[in-house]
């Protein structure tokens, strides 16, 4: 019998913010590995484009317009996803926004609250509702467990000047993940976090065309390039698959070696 731990046939993964960037990188790799996919996003055009791209893999794809900053949206969205797909085996809480300022002293409460509403509240509600479904499934006799993944950032472990609100939310993702890992292991649920470095997405568009940024920052990345959404396909498949069945409470730094240089 061949060893196929990365085969995602029969598994369903939900990715928040999955219509672009790192989230779509997760989704593409999961679909290419045999998994079915649920995408949450707020942009209708990007949702439609992501759906078309993912369906090309021949997998089931369910796209929902869900704003993770709304508790009601998250609760209803999770119920709808389970109803449409029959189950959810892994959840990637990836939706996030930036929100810095010229200096910490100039950062407004409005900016702070807006970043928290998506990056922290949204992850909290997504984690909670995903765990609710997985625990209920376990108690009903399905002992297959599940995988909860929070997308944090290097900002959670390094000094992110002028980005205190963003950094605070990403640190919170790691703390929530650890708490979920400990409390829900008895239900076969594992929880991990992914910490991206400098990745070429819409969120970093401001820096991608800057010669100064390239010279001062990207030149310090040992891989000597920006990361891409495709660089996150492997970790997504691993965490969604049975290959990671005993791996929980961990943080995966994917940054081309930047943090250790």
Image (tube, helix red, strand yellow):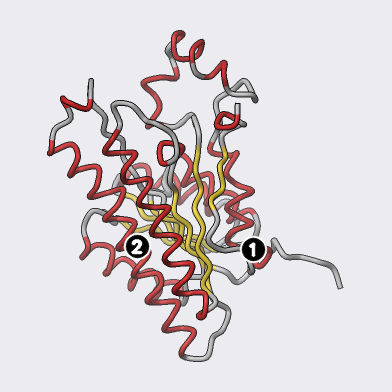
Between disc 1 and disc 2, whose residue precedes?
2
Q: Is residue 37 above or below residue 164?
A: below
Q: Quadrant of residue 231?
A: top right
Q: Which residue is mark 2?
A: 126
Question: Left or right of 140: which side holds 7?
Answer: right
Q: Position of residue 190 (x, y in %)?
A: 53, 67
Q: Is residue 67 above or below residue 167?
A: below
Q: Residues within 10 Å of mark 2 (few under 14, many from 20)?
A: many
Q: Which mark is on residue 103?
A: none
Question: Left or right of 211: which side holds 33?
Answer: right
Q: Position of residue 55 (x, y in %)?
A: 53, 54
Q: Quadrant of residue 74?
A: bottom left
Furthest toward the right, the residue is: 1
Q: Residue at x 42, y 12 (%)?
A: 210
Question: Left or right of 259: which side holds 206?
Answer: left
Closest to the observer: 77 or 162?
162
Quarter that holds the C terminus = top right
Q: Position of residue 203 (x, y in %)?
A: 37, 32
Q: Residues within 10 Å of mark 1 (few under 14, many from 20)?
A: some
Q: Which residue is mark 1?
A: 244
User: Distance between the Cα atoms at labels 1 and 2?
Assistant: 21 Å
Quarter that holds the N terminus = bottom right
Q: Position of residue 233 (x, y in %)?
A: 60, 47
Q: Is residue 103 above or below residue 128?
A: above
Q: Residue at x 26, y 55 (%)?
A: 121
SS under mark 1? helix
Q: Residue at x 36, y 21 (%)?
A: 206
Q: Is residue 5 above or below residue 156?
A: below
Question: Left or right of 246: which side holds 99?
Answer: left
Q: Total number of numbered labels?
A: 2
SS under mark 2? helix
């Amino acid at each position: 019998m061949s060893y196929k731990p990365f085969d995602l046939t029969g598994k369903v993964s939900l990715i928040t913010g999955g219509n672009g960037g790192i989230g779509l990188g997760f989704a593409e790799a999961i679909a290419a590995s045999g998994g079915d996919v649920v995408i949450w996003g707020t942009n209708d055009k990007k949702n439609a484009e992501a759906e078309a791209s993912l369906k090309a893999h021949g997998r089931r794809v369910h796209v929902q317009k869900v704003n993770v900053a709304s508790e009601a949206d998250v609760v209803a969205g999770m119920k709808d996803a389970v109803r449409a797909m029959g189950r959810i085996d892994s959840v990637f809480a990836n939706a996030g926004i930036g929100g810095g300022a010229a200096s910490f002293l100039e950062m407004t409460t409005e900016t702070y609250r807006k970043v928290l509403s998506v990056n922290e509240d949204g992850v909290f509600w997504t984690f909670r509702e995903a765990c609710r479904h997985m625990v209920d499934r376990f108690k009903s006799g399905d002992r297959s467990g599940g995988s909860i993944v929070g997308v944090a950032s290097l900002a959670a472990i390094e000094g992110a000047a002028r980005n205190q609100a963003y950094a605070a939310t990403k640190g919170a993702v790691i703390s929530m993940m650890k708490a979920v890992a400990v409390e829900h292991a008895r239900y076969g649920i594992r929880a991990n976090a992914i910490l991206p470095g400098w990745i070429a997405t819409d969120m970093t568009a401001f820096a991608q065309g800057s010669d100064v940024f390239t010279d001062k920052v990207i030149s310090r990345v040992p891989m000597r390039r920006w990361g891409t959404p495709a660089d996150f396909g492997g970790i997504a498949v691993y965490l969604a698959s049975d290959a990671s069945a005993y791996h929980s409470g961990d943080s995966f730094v994917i940054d081309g070696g930047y943090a250790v240089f």
